[in-house]
Amino acid sequence: MKVSVQTAHLGVYARIKHDHIMKPKEPQQPNSRRDFIKKTAVGVAAFSIVPRYVLGGQGFIAPSDKLTKAVIGVGGMGRGHFGYEGTQVVAICDVDRNHLQQAAAMLDKGVKTFSDYRELIQLPEVDIVHIATPPHWHGIMSVDAARAGKDVWCEKPMTHTIGEGKRVVEAMKQHGRMFRLNTWFRFKDTFYGMGTTVKPIRKLVQSGLLGWPLKVTVSKHTGYDWKFYWVGKEHLDPQPVPPELDYDSWLGPAPYKPYNAHRVHQTFRGYWDYDGGGLADMGQHYIDPIQYFLGKDDTSPVSVEIDAPQQHSDAVGTWRRITYTYEDGCQIVLDGEGRDENVPYIEGPKGKLYPGFKSDIPDLERKLAAFPDPEPQITEFSESVRTRKKFALNEENGHRSCTIVNMGLVALRLGRSLKFDPVKQEFVNDEAANRLINPVMRAPYTI
């Protein structure tokens, strides 16, 4: 059965454990979720989960064994990753009963189904938790899964806010977990309009042949699409919640707003509460490889400048240009209009690189051959899980590239350019911007 990955991934996060697909239950009392959280916290404190990878114990994973995976969020994105990289799906979770039924029909009958992710992550047989929900759930679920002793495979963007990203980094370290962010262009596949993988681009940058500092322009003319169709509607009439959807749990930590079909499923990206339009959808795909080939995985830009219409408080709009500047003068320019038709992808004081890996540097191929290749990376998450060595795109460098995306989103929401401290990871002298680093979550949710 083929499933379109274009169908947006749905969140997953409710209250009731399912060992089989169940009919909807009556609404619970307001305090029931708080009671569940208290009981879960006590249970986690009372015992520790011993992961299967522990050598010498019953949990040892032989090299020939398949790793087990649970998927939270089985809309199109989640279902599209069931067969990824030699893993076996043993459990799934979703707050939409229709999504859960469709996903269960694709899998073995023994697969366990849940509507509450907190129940799923306690399964001792699960090695990896794959989070394919809307982004406003990524941070909370990643931290909870790490606390439960699971390695985490998370869809992009890594987190909905900068503060959530910092907390995920802390949790993976605290609990000794492996983390993979699911964008892969820094280590495989042709990088959009460049006509090559990122590896030779990093080699070129490291060689110094282009000079320094560098300006990188991400534009439709260099092979990129900002997907400005991911915009929200400014006026949404309340609608009845479909019986198959637990809308309160879909919202989770997001502010309560009346249900409208345009808020959920395929079109949630158009609303600030859950995502951030085309920039949040595609930003890490486009920007993470730039962080890598510029050698800036451990830092962030010091400023973000925007040229955009005033944004609506609820619905995401479009933008014309976003410019990030690093302390050393390197820049990343996001061109939303396609303003500069003949712009190079990378421009330095000594040379330029254009789409198709074309350059104005004479005899570039021969000159590059004299320089060493980039350092090797672990590019199969199963290897990270088995060896306990970090994946190529992990929580630390993933948080830094996601921070660039979130810096832009904060600037757009506020309608002004901002200064940023990459060490403290906070905005400089801007209280309103810093409130958006750690916005208040709807009770009782917390990270």
Image (cartoon, helix red, strand yellow):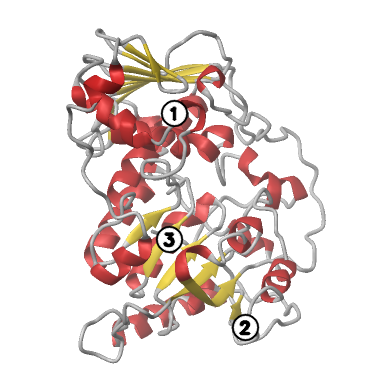
Q: Mark 1 or 2 closer to N-term? A: 2
- The type of residue carrying mark 2 is His
Q: Which residue occupies the foreground of this view, 282 or 26?
A: 282
Q: Label 1, on which residue?
A: 408
Q: CA distance from mark 3 to mark 2?
A: 23 Å
Please, is residue 174 above or below residue 182 in the view?
A: below
Please, is residue 302 above or below residue 387 in the view?
A: above
Secondary structure beneath disc 3?
Answer: strand
Q: Label 2, on which residue?
A: 18
Please identify the residue farthest to the bottom as the structure is shown: 58
Q: Mark 1 or 3 closer to N-term? A: 3
- The type of residue carrying mark 3 is Trp
Residue at point 30%, 22% (across, down): 365
Q: Locate residue 354: give its quadrant.
A: top left
Are the residues flagged by discs 1 and 2 in contact, CB closer than 8 Å? no
Residue at point 33%, 75% (across, down): 149
Residue 153, label in figure: 3
Residue 248, label in figure: none
Answer whether residue 326 is visible to the viewer in this image: no
Residue at point 36%, 79% (across, down): 64
Badge 3: how crowded within 10 Å, few (<14), some, or many (20+)?
many
Answer whether residue 79 is visible to the viewer in this image: yes
Q: CA distance from mark 1 to mark 2?
A: 40 Å
Residue 69: where, in percent of width, then height? 47, 73
Secondary structure beneath disc 2?
Answer: loop
Residue at point 69%, 51% (across, down): 7
Closer to viewer: mark 3 or mark 2? 3
Residue 159: where, in percent of width, then height? 43, 48
* 19 on left or right of 403: right
Q: CA distance from mark 1 to mark 3?
A: 25 Å
